[in-house]
Image: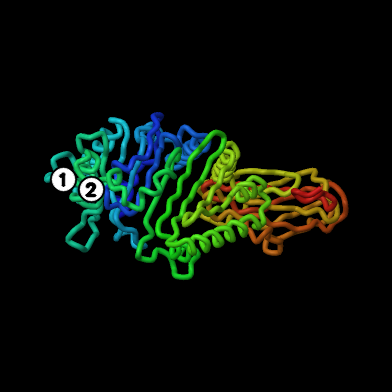
Amino acid sequence: MPSLLRHCLLLALPILGLPSVRAAYTPAVVSADARWVIYADLNSLRAGTVGKELILAMEKAQSQATGGVIGIDIPKLLATVGALTAYGTNLSSDPNAIDGTLIIQGTAEMRTIAESLLLQGTLAQPKIFSEVSDLPFSAYAIADPNATTAEKTRVVIAFPPEPIVIVSKSKPQVVKAREVFRGTSPSLANTPASPLNKLVATAEGAFLYTASVVPTEPLFPQNAPQARILQLASSGSLALGERGPNTFAHAELFASSEQNAERLTKILQGMTAMLSLAETNDKQLAEFINSTSVTRRNDTVTLDLAYASSRLAQMVQGLRSTAEPRPANRGPSITNGKSLAEWTAPAADGNAATDPNALSWRTIENVSLVNGTTITLGRALNSGRNARFDRVEISAADGTGTPLVFRSEFMRAVNNRSGLSQFQFPGSDGVYTVKVAYVNDPDGKAKFAVSVRDPKSPAPGKK
């Protein structure tokens, strides 16, 4: 199944792309019995202010996901698809129960690339990809090899002579979709009685348009707000597009009666008012929410939103910047304050390698310490092993007196990290020699550090 999903994703990538020639929604490519339709004018989206930012975000994500190395130029591939029209006769909460057909319109290169990928699939994974031989044009089936039913075909992708690609769940639906496109089978364009035709005007100037008759099967939980709205409506549509400097959203709901239209109006107005009262520190987001209006005319309730495209683009830029990965983690710091010494000990020689607990010494001379100075021992394994501190001996720089000994088991771990430990110097102010005993990583990968911070010095990030 993962292989099937990967290949379906690869084939679906062009659906997100957008060439430069504009298109418009036409009911002539939609079957007359359709009860829902989704149309995307990807050309218009890419030409718009917000669309350009979305494409940049998509290309950025693609580059990051592949490390900038991929065998196919995804942005160029995306630019081969112009418009998408999907439709079907039923809607269901179960994706497997939804019928539907997708008509993809684009350049000749789109067809060539898509068919090439499918043909390669039949050679590389014949259990998933296969050629369909009983259609009068090239077509390929993608199957689920793990399906337990006799019918394993999940989708059929067809390449008729017309400048389209047809995607559907069965061969009869593919044939019917082609007949509708050629005008030899009834379409919405010559079926004025279809409830979807009342909503066509909404699509004008939109780069995304969807319309549907309210399905008889419940799509949402009974007490969900969406379910209550659908109980009052018979059909509806949503259009997103760009006019002048603004991006707009226009939704229309046809109520089953004028009384229900009044109820719908009150529900939507209440929901809009609640959104406008939401607390947010983002001024642009607050303005965006407050730009929504709800009106009613007879049995039709409309919701309108218009917002400056430039500001929406800024919002997309903000989302893109927060989604960008941070610089690679270089590991936690192993110093705290002034560094006295940092070192990577050499790999152990043959004799030391036989004793994993053999001690090495690091001597740091002429160290100024005051009473209460915090001394930090830092260690980074760097995929090494066995490296650890054993003890610290502090003696007067002139060699007089008995050294003070601080063993690692009595030091305080910083933030419960074993690689960073501290203790405070209890002696008199003066100049000292600090000797550090440690067990080295036999491969010489571990890094060690000793640092100090006087009691009057500010902690990192504080003044």
* Image coords of residue 252 (percent x, y): 47, 52
Please name whichever residue, 328 or 57, is drawn nearer the observer in this view of the structure.
57
CA neighbours of label 2 inside 10 A, class few (<14), some (14 to 19), many (20+):
many
CA neighbours of label 1 inside 10 A, class few (<14), some (14 to 19), many (20+):
some
Q: Secondary structure at mark 2?
A: strand
Instruction: Tell whether label 2 touches label 1 (CB within 8 Å).
Output: yes
Please name whichever residue, 210 or 283, is drawn nearer the observer in this view of the structure.
210
Q: Is residue 325 left or right of residue 366?
A: left
Most extreme residue toward the right, as rendered?
A: 429
Which mark is drawn over residue 379? none
Q: Residue at x 61, y 47 (%)?
A: 291
* Image coords of residue 122 (percent x, y): 20, 44
Q: Residue at x 80, y 56 (%)?
A: 425
Quick check: can you spot residue 457?
yes
Q: Which badge, 1 or 2, is on the more N-terminal residue?
A: 1
* Image coords of residue 221 (percent x, y): 44, 68
Q: Secondary structure at mark 1?
A: loop
Q: Amino acid at mark 2?
A: Val
| Residue 215 sits in quarter | bottom left
The quadrant of the rendering that contains the N terminus is: bottom left
Please name whichever residue, 326 or 186, is drawn nearer the observer in this view of the structure.
186
* Image coords of residue 225 (percent x, y): 50, 64
Most extreme residue toward the bottom, as rendered?
A: 222
Q: Give the labeled residue for mark 1.
A: 132
Q: Is residue 173 left or right of residue 355?
A: left
Q: Give the labeled residue for mark 2.
A: 156
Quick check: can you spot residue 129?
no
Q: Is residue 104 left or right of residue 183?
A: right
Q: CA distance from mark 1 to mark 2?
A: 8 Å
Q: Amino acid at mark 1?
A: Val
